[in-house]
Image (spheres, coloured by chain):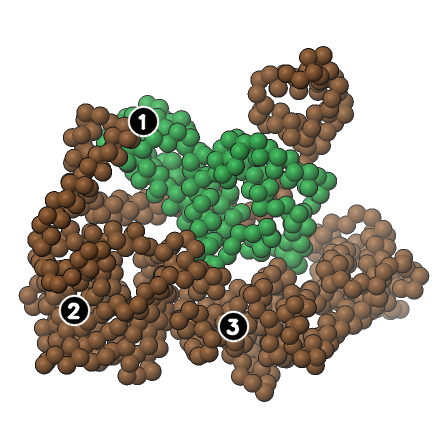
Chain colours: A brown, B green
Amino acid sequence: MTGTQKLGLDNFKHLDDASLLSLLDGELAAPEQKRAEEHLASCWTCRDRQTQLQGSIGQFLSFRDTLLPEDIGSVPAPVEQFRQRLSRHVEQRAAARSGWAKALENFRETAGALVWSRQAALAAVVVVVVLIVTFTDVLTSTASAETLLRRAESFESAHSPGTNSVRLRSVRMEHIGAGQQTQDLGTVEFARDNGGAEYVTSGQASSQRKSGLLVRSANEAVDTSRILPEEGALPASVEHYLETEQWLPDVSVPEFRKLVAARQSADTSSKKSGGAFEISYPFAPGHSSGIREARLEMDAETYEPERVSIVTAEAGEFRFTRVAEKSTPRTEEWAKVFGEPSLPNSRVHGGQSLAGVSKVVPLAYANSVASEQELAAAAALHKLDACLGEEIYVFPMSDGTVLVQGLVDRPERRDAIRSALRSLPFPVIVQVTTPKEWTTGAALYPPPDQLAATNLPRGTGATVTIADASGREIPLYDEISRRVTKPGITDEELHQRVASFSNEAVTLSRQALLHAWALRRLDTEFSDRRIAQLPAGSRQAADRLRNEHRQAISKLSRRQAELLASLTGRTLDEAGSGEHLQDAEALLRLAERQNLLMRRLFTMSEPVGDTQASLNLLFDALHQISR
Amino acid sequence: MHSDRVLNSAAILGFVKAETPRKVPLEEVVVEAYVSVRPALLSYLYHIVGSTGDAEDVVQITFLKLFDQLQKNAEILELRGWLYKVAHNLAIDSLRRQGREESASTEWLDGLTAPGDSTEDRMIRRQQVRQVLGGLNERERRCLMLRAEGLSYKEIGDVLEMSAKSVSVYLTRGLKKIEGRAL
C-alpha cells in the first residue's frame, strides 16, 4: 500500500484512461473498482472523460458495422452444406483411425478404464509406440507393408516443411522396358509449403510440348496430365487411371496411397533388400488400368520414401525416383506462388528464376527496382489514359520480364492497349482482355503492393440525376437554372441545361480525382528508390508522367472554378491562400474533398448542409489543387 | 459416445440446452453450435480475411476442429475464447497461404465494400475508413474488434497471445486514436 493510499489521498488523483475503460468494461478487481467508483462519484473531470471514451466506443462500433457487407447478418447459415462437410470429415477421421491407431485406441480404452488423465493417456501412447517399435524392429524383415507405410508417413510428417520454409524435391521419371533398357522421361520438381499447397513443374526429356506447371492446394482436384510423362509414354489405360486418381509422380506416402486406392485388392507384401524396404501393393488381376502392381521403396533405417514403381501388365515398369531434396526459405515470391492458381497460358521464361523452379511471379515493389521496360510500359498506358482508374497494372516479374495485366470494358479498348504495348521496342507480356474473355483459372494478380489501396473502379463517366419523381432536386438547382436559362426556352429544355451543367462539373471533378489518384500511384510504382538505378533519361520520363498528371489536375480544377464563378461570385485569384502542393498524398486528399463537395452540391446522392458554405469550401479546395 | 463434459461445455456456451438427452449425436451438437455462434465469428473473421466466402470457410473449419476436440473428449475450459483463437489463427493462416500478410497497413480494407454502393461512394468510404483506421496498428485494431465481439480482456489476451493488462493498454490507445473521428 502506498503512502497516498494510506492517507486516503487517492481521491485527489484523476483516473487514467485505462482505468476508466477497465471500469466501464467491468475488468477492475473489486477493491480497485470500489476506489474508482468513489473517485468518479466526486470527480466531474473523470466522469466527463469516461463519457468521451464511451463516445469513442460508439464511433468504433458504427465504423465497424459500416465495413461489414449489408447482407452478412441476413444470409442464413449454410447449415446443410456444413452438415455434409462435417459428415465427410467424420468419415475421413474414421478411415484414418485404422491400423495400429485402432489398436492404440483399444489399448487406451482398456487402460482408460483404470486411470484417465491426460498424463496417463500420454504415457499409454508412449508405451504402445515403444511396444510397436520394439516388436517390429526385432522382426524387421517381416514388418507388414502397412506398418512400413505408416513409418514412412511418420518420417514425412516429422520432416514436413516448417511455417517459414518450402520443401523442394526433384523426381526423375524413367521407363524400364523389355530387356531392362532404361528410357529417361524427364524430371518433375515439386515445391510444397506447410499448408499442403503444392507447386509442381515438369520438364519433359524428349519434348517441350508439356512444360507443365500447376499449383494445387491440399486435396484440390487439378489437371494432372500436364505433369505426367508426355502423351504416349504411358499406356492410355494407365494414364487414364492416374488422372482419375489425381496422382502426381511424387515419391511420397500420400501420393502412393492415391496410387493404390482403387486397386481392388487387399494383398500387400514387403521385403528387405540391402539398405531398403520395398512394399508391394498388387492390383486385382485384370485391373482396368492395366497396372499389375505399385511398389514403394524406402530407406531401411529412416523409412524415407525413395522410389515409386508402377509395374504394368504390358508396358514394363515406370519408375519415379527421388533425386534431390532441400528446404528453402518461404520468401514473399514463394508465398505468391502458392497463393495463385496456375497460369496455363503464360509462357515460362528462362533467366533468373526462383530457387530452381521456373514459375514466374510478380515481384513486390519493395523487393525490386524499376526497369526501363517497366517505365516504358507505364508510359504507354499513361498515353492512353489507362492509368486513370482502369484496372490495368504493370508487373515486374521474377525473371526480369514485364507483364501488363488487366481487364477492360470494351474490345476496342483492349485492342488499343494491346497495340500500344506491342509497338514498344522490347517484348512485354500482355494479358489485357475483357472480363468475358478471361480464361477460367488463369491468375489475375492482385495489384502490386499498395496500388490496391489506390485502385479506382473502372469507367470515368459520372451521371447526374437532377430530379426524380418525388420532386427532389439537386441543392443548386435554382442557382444553376438562373445561370443557364435563356429567353423563350421550355421547362424541359431548361431542365436539360441544368443537367448538362451539373454533369460537366461532376465529371471535371471526378477527372481531377482520377489524376490525383494516378499521381499517388506513380509515387509507389516509381518511387525514388525504385528508379534510382535507371539512366537519367528514364528518370526524367517518370517525372514527366507525374508532371502531366499535375498539370491535368490544375487545368481541371481551374475549369471547375470557372464553372462555379457565377455561383460563388469568386474567382480563383481571390480565393483563400494555400501552399503549392508537392505531396501527392495531400493532393489526393484535397482532390477527394473537392469531389465529395462537388457531389454534394451537384447530385442528389449526398446530403448537403449549408449550400453556400459548401461552395466556399469547394472553392478553397479547388484553389489549393489548381496551383 | 460423448460425455457429460462435452454437453456441459456446450451448455455453458448456451448453444445446447442443459437437459439435451445424451442420445443426440455429437455431430448434431456441433451443427447447433455452428448455427448459433456463426454470425459473431463471421463478422469478426470478415475483418481479417476481407470476404464473406473466406470467412464462412474459416468458420466451418473451426467447427470441424471443435468436433475433433470434443470427440477426443478433450476438455475445453473456455469455449468462446477457444473458438475465437482457433478461428483467428486459421484466418491468419489462410491469408498467408494466399500470400497476403497481415500488416499494420490498411491493405485489408481494400476488399471491403458494401453492395449497392456507387463506385464513388466506394472510393470515398474506403478513404474515410482508411483515414480513421489507418492510424491504428494491428494489435489495437484486433483488440478493439474482439472487445466489440464481447470478449473479456483475458479472452482477448488468449487469442492474441498477450496479457490482459496489455489488452487494456491497446484498447485505450486505439480508442484515443479514434476519438472525435466520426465518419
Residue with the most extreme left position:
A285
Left or right for A204, reference A594: left
Q: Which amino acid does label 2 sit on?
A: Ile
What percent of the width, then of the height, locates residue B179? 70, 39
Chain of the residue where label 3 is placed in the rendered structure: A
The numbered mark at residue A106 is none
Residue with the most extreme top position:
A7
Q: Which of marks 3 and 1 is in front?
A: 3
The numbered mark at residue B5 is 1
Tell me if I can see residue A361 in this picture: yes
What percent of the width, then of the height, locates residue B84? 46, 39
Task: Say if labels 2 and 1 share a chain.
Answer: no
List the residue tagged with mark 3. Answer: A397
Left or right for A400, reference A221: right
Crowd rating for badge 3 (residues with CA inside 10 Å; few <14, some 14–19, many 20+): some
Q: Which residue is drawn at 20% across and 60% down?
A: A299
Chain of the residue where label 2 is placed in the rendered structure: A
Quote the CA–CA distance across marks 2 and 3. 39 Å
Task: Say if labels 2 and 3 share a chain.
Answer: yes
Crowd rating for badge 1 (residues with CA inside 10 Å; few <14, some 14–19, many 20+): some
Q: Earlier in the sequence, mark 2 or mark 3?
A: 2
Dividing the picture into quarters, in which one does residue B19 lie? Answer: top left
Q: Looking at the picture, does residue B159 appear above or below residue A314?
A: above
Quote the CA–CA distance across marks 2 and 1. 50 Å
What percent of the width, then of the height, locates residue A349? 44, 79
Q: A271 or A227, which is in the foreground? A: A271
Q: Looking at the picture, does residue A166 appear above or below residue B92?
A: below
List the residue tagged with mark 2. Answer: A310
Q: A64 or A126, which is in the foreground? A: A126
